[in-house]
Image (cartoon, grey):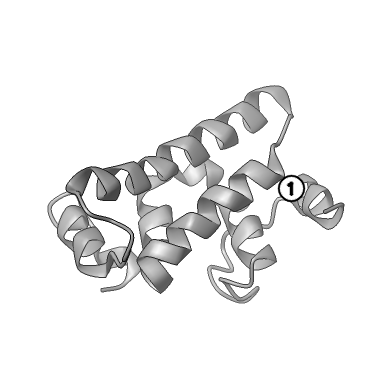
Amino acid sequence: MRFNELNEDNFLFFAIQNYNNPQSVTQDDFFDDLKKIKYIKRLFKKYKTTGEIKTNLILIHITVLYNVFGQAATPILFFKISSEYWSCLKTFLIFLDRLDKTQLMSIPIDEYCLEKLGEI
């Protein structure tokens, strides 16, 4: 399933289908992993309102999502995160080598995020 095919009706099925966490023993673990998306959204919102970006924390949450959802994390993130934060998201995914610079070319790279990621 591609990014543009996700909707509210099939999102949960898509996420469950792509979830692979050998440590997980309950469905609570699955939903706890999905909550990482909310945390990322909050961190992006804080960045947009205050100018403060917590790059390490965002990187950790994104990495956890890729560890349990694999490449399906990309469409999951773009579906669940508002388009106003896509430039930040794209910048982090390029930094983590999860997205090619030529992918989603209509979405610009966030220069400030890129600068902060370069300091790591």
The quadrant of the picture occupied by the N terminus is: bottom left
Name the one closer to the observer, 87 or 25. 25
In percent of width and height, residue 35 lies at: 37, 40
Count the labels in the image.
Answer: 1
Say left or right for 96 vs 114.
Answer: left
Judging depth in this view, the residue of 113 and 108 nearest the camera is 113
Q: Residue at x 18, y 53 (%)?
A: 12
In which quadrant is the C terminus drawn?
Answer: bottom right
Q: Secondary structure at mark 1?
A: helix
Q: How far from the left and from the top, in percent, is residue 11?
A: 21, 55
Q: What percent of the width, then of the height, locates residue 42?
A: 51, 31
Residue found 30% across the figure and 67% down from its top: 20
User: Residue 63, percent across and down?
Assistant: 54, 59
Q: Nearer the viewer, residue 67 or 12?
A: 67
Q: Residue at x 71, y 50 (%)?
A: 110
Q: Residues within 10 Å of mark 1 (few under 14, many from 20)?
A: many
Vertical side of 16 occupied by 48: above or below: above
Left or right: residue 53 versus residue 77 is: right
What amino acid type should be assigned to the residue bearing mark 1? Cys
Q: Residue furthest top?
A: 50
Residue 46 versus residue 66: which sits nearer the camera?
66
Res 100 seen here: yes
Q: Is residue 88 visible?
A: no
Residue occupying image coordinates x 84% and y 57%:
118
Instruction: Name the quadrant containing residue 23.
Output: bottom left
Which quadrant would residue 18 be assigned to in this image?
bottom left
Q: Which residue is mark 1?
A: 113
- 74 relative to 27, above or below: below
